Amino acid sequence: MQRWQIILIVYLLLINLIGAGLVVSDKKRARQNRWRIRERSLFLAAALGGCPGVYLTMKKIRHKTQHKRFMIGLPLIFALQLLGTGAAYWFYFR
């Protein structure tokens, strides 16, 4: 495995853990009527590669699952990321 691949895997693991942590923290804060994490921060973590972690954590702990913006937006972001990855592979690595 090349160095850039290891860096990419570590980055994706970290951003997914950060995204999942943001979701868990937001739910905890919501239950305690405290200051909440902005939705844009959750979407930013997802857009930076943490979409699986954010989405799966939301589903697992049932947080923001009634918000169509998240239940449609996160899978859409993930689909676009997969398309972009596929296109990059097609043009640069085949």
Image (spheres, grey):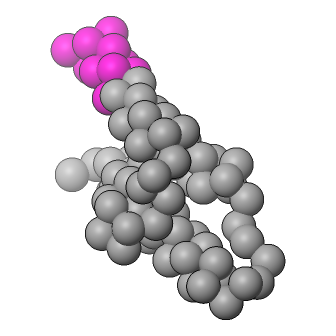
Left or right: where 3 falls relative to 90: right
Residue for point 40% across, 63% down:
58
Residue lying farthest to the front in this orientation:
66
Q: How many marks?
A: 0
**Percent coordinates x, y for residue 7 in the rendering:** 42, 56
Q: Is residue 88 magenta?
A: yes
Decide whether the magenta segment is chiefly helix, strand or loop: helix
Q: Is residue 56 magenta?
A: no
Residue for point 76% across, 84% down:
34
Residue for point 73% across, 59% down:
38
Q: Bounds of the magenta span?
A: 82-94
In front: 63, or 17? 63
**Percent coordinates x, y for residue 89 in the rendering:** 28, 21
In front: 71, or 3? 71
Choose top left, top right, bottom left or bottom right for residue 30.
bottom right
Choose top left, top right, bottom left or bottom right for residue 57.
bottom left
Left or right: where 6 falls relative to 33: left
Residue for point 46% across, 66% down:
63
